[in-house]
């Protein structure tokens, strides 16, 4: 596990991601571009065989750091439930909460494509409910695309959203909104489950999804799905062969309390950095050594 100091961490965020090109070449996050990434850019990246990173984001300030660092796609995931709002799972997250968080992430960014997650209960009734919910994320929050969970079971919702002009990122494999029926287990193990995952992947592609998240599936199966599909696959716990990789930002920067899934690589230890700084502030206030003359006005 690699852990960076605070100084190394800030140095790293000051650099654009590797795919950035200072000459404005075709890389997904070209250095000279000023407009937002679109789903067409994402399709062209798949044609070029260019891999790309995606991170979750739940607020404007954090999202602005990721935008500056060159993250081309940000997901306002309903993982906000566990990582930002203090719920135990993603299930209680509401559409109002997702609209508020998504709007903040849009405001904090100027380059990334922002994908807003449709929370549990906002699209399962059918395509019309999905369109009503997705329309709120697009109109009120300003996202460029939405994400929803489910393969074959969600293809009618995807079709109507895409027909209506809303790009959709699908999400198959482990789908956390189904934790009460599915648990948090690896999906697609065994011949029958692997065939179902392939059917799900093709169903969302045929319905018009521009990309598909593969969560917690065997690396070999994710590689096969990536070969078979013409839309990009975005892996999380799905091995190295997917077109893109997504991580939950609080996991990869070491802010999450307790155990993180084994597929997470922790690039920094923000929890220790923040705890140390906050303790130092508290100690100085108690000792009367903060504020000093330079922090005072007269
Ligand atoms: O909600 C989320 O953050 C997600 C990612 C884990 C893909 O769905």
Image: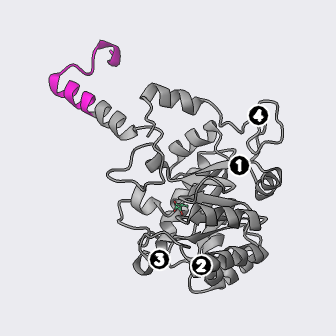
State the extent of the magenta-drawn residues as a range: 279-298
**Alpha-carbon distance for marks 2 and 3?**
22 Å
Return the residue nearer the eye: 152 or 225.
Answer: 225
**Alpha-carbon distance for marks 4 and 3?**
40 Å
**Alpha-carbon distance for marks 2 and 4?**
42 Å
Q: Which residue is mark 1?
A: 51
Compared across the picture, whether 109 is left or right of 230 comes to: left
Q: Which residue is mark 2?
A: 191
Q: Earlier in the sequence, mark 4 or mark 1?
A: 4
Q: Which residue is mark 4?
A: 21
Residue at 78% x, 42% y: name it.
Answer: 27
Q: Secondary structure at mark 3?
A: helix
Instruction: Choose top left, top right, bottom left or bottom right for residue 67.
Output: top right
Q: Nearer the viewer, mark 1 or mark 3?
A: 1
Q: Which residue is mark 3?
A: 178
Instruction: Choose top left, top right, bottom left or bottom right for residue 155.
Output: bottom right
């Amino acid at each position: 596990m690699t852990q960076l100091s605070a100084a190394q961490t800030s140095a790293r965020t000051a650099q654009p991601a590797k795919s950035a090109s200072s000459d404005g070449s075709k890389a997904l996050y070209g250095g000279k571009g000023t407009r937002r990434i679109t789903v067409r850019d994402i399709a062209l990246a798949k044609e070029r065989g260019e891999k790309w990173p995606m991170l979750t984001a739940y607020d404007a300030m954090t999202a602005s750091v990721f935008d500056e660092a060159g993250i081309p796609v940000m997901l306002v995931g309903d993982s906000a439930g566990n990582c930002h709002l203090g719920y135990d799972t993603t299930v209680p997250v509401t559409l109002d909460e997702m609209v508020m968080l998504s709007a903040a992430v849009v405001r904090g960014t100027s380059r990334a494509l922002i994908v807003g997650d449709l929370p549990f209960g906002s699209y399962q009734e059918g395509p019309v409910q999905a369109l009503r919910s997705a329309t709120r994320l697009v109109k009120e929050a300003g996202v460029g695309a939405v994400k929803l969970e489910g393969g074959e079971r969600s293809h009618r919702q995807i079709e109507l959203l895409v027909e209506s002009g809303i790009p959709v990122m699908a999400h198959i494999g482990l789908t956390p909104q189904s934790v009460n029926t599915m648990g948090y287990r690896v999906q697609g193990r065994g011949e029958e489950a692997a065939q179902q995952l392939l059917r799900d992947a093709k169903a969302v592609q045929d319905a018009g999804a521009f990309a598909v998240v593969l969560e917690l599936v065997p690396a070999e199966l994710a590689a096969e799905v990536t070969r078979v599909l013409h839309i990009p696959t975005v892996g999380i716990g799905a091995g190295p062969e997917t077109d893109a990789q997504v991580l939950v930002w609080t996991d990869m920067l070491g802010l999450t309390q307790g155990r993180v899934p084994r597929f997470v690589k922790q690039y920094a230890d923000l929890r220790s950095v923040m705890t140390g700084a906050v303790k130092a502030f508290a100690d100085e206030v108690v000792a009367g050594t903060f504020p000093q003359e330079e922090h005072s006005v007269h």
